[in-house]
Image (tube, grey):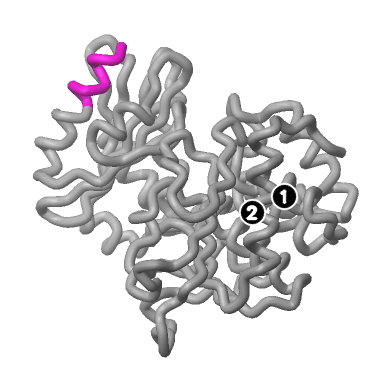
């Protein structure tokens, strides 16, 4: 299965392939607090570099979330805290699913100032940093772009890489439910299932199963669910005490913001995760009317039209008030 590619996109794919064919001793990294697409995309690049007999290192500031550790090759992704720093800084870097170079976090300490960078991503806010950039803003996931790249590279796909790609598509489309689930996405998913990918098993593990800590965190969050008087904006918040007392980890927050957005009549759902007394991470989701990526950008963040986020300095109550007022301006 192949999709008609624009000339610019086809050229960018070829440039990315040339970069990957010519590189060696490469560092492959994604954004901090990685999700399914970030981890999957990191693994796909590792799989491809293996095929081409390249040396590489897969790493993320936070390592691999527990629910993604069953992915093929997942044990190859190290975390910044647990890995030994390289003897010399990397001169070749491949960034996947990372809209802003700064989002690689502390891994930047391992990278030479003049390093060659290949940037592969699908976020609309990506500014095409790096020597080569393969960006498709209307792709549902970076995994979708990597599928196109693998086809162009002429490598034979197998169940292993198919599982990686399917995981990225599944998670970034919300189980093929979000508006980014295009005919191309479904065609790609179909081709991956033909490789023997167990889509139902992946969906059960990633979308249907939750830990007891996650359930307790949801209970706390829902107890604080608040709406504007017109019920078009809903929000909830989580504190460091909540995380500590429930035993939850960051991956347990995934999907929590949707409880606010999914209420009938709500245009924008917000989750405020207090990091400390003067820092809050904000997750934003919208239904149809509001471009939350623009709102996130106004606070120094970014993302997609329907899903975005930012990190804001200040007290929790003040940030909730500021962000809710900013969202009101878009309604």
Residue 61, x across and y down, in percent: 40, 68
> In the shown orientation, is residue 54 left or right of residue 75?
right
Eyeballing the image, is 292 above or below 166?
above
Q: Is residue 290 above or below residue 126?
A: above
Residue beneath label 1, please? 149
Task: Answer whether labels 2 and 1 touch (C-beta < 8 Å).
Answer: yes
Circle 1 — which element? helix
- Quadrant of the rendered structure where residue 163 is? bottom right
The N terminus: image quadrant: top right
Pointer 2: what residue?
A: 16
Residue span colored magenta = 324-331
Q: Which of disc 1 and disc 2 is earlier in sequence?
A: 2
Circle 2 residues within 10 Å: few <14, some 14–19, many ≥20: many
Picture layout, residue 57 above or below residue 18: below
Residue 166 visible, this orientation: no
Image quarter of residue 109: bottom left
């Amino acid at each position: 299965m192949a999709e008609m590619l624009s000339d610019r996109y086809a050229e960018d794919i070829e440039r990315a392939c040339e970069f990957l064919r010519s590189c060696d001793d490469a560092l492959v990294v994604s954004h901090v607090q990685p999700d399914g697409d970030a981890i999957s995309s990191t693994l796909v690049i590792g799989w491809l570099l293996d095929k081409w007999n390249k040396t590489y290192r897969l790493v993320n500031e936070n390592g691999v979330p527990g629910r993604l550790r069953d992915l093929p090759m997942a044990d190859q992704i190290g975390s910044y805290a647990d890995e030994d720093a390289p003897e010399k800084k990397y001169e070749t870097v491949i960034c996947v699913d990372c809209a802003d170079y700064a989002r690689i976090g502390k891994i930047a300490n391992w990278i030479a100032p003049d390093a060659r960078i290949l940037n592969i991503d699908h976020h609309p806010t990506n500014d095409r940093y790096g020597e080569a950039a393969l960006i498709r803003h209307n792709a549902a996931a970076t995994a979708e772009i990597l599928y196109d790249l693998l086809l162009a590279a002429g490598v034979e796909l197998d169940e292993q890489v198919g599982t990686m790609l399917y995981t990225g598509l599944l998670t970034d489309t919300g189980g093929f439910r979000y508006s980014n689930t295009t005919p191309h996405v479904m065609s790609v998913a179909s081709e991956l299932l033909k490789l023997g990918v167990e889509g139902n098993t992946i969906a059960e593990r990633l979308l249907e199963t939750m830990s007891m800590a996650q359930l307790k965190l949801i209970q706390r969050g829902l107890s604080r669910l608040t709406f504007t008087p017109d019920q078009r904006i809903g929000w909830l918040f989580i504190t460091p005490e909540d995380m500590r007392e429930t035993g939850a980890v960051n991956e347990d927050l995934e999907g929590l913001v949707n409880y606010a957005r999914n209420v009938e009549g709500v245009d924008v759902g917000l989750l405020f995760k207090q990091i400390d007394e003067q820092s809050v991470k904000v997750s934003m989701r919208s239904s149809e009317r509001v471009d939350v990526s623009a709102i996130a950008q106004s606070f120094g963040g970014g993302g997609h039209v329907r899903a975005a986020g930012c990190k804001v300095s200040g007290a929790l109550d003040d940030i909730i008030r500021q962000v809710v007022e900013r969202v009101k301006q878009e309604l």
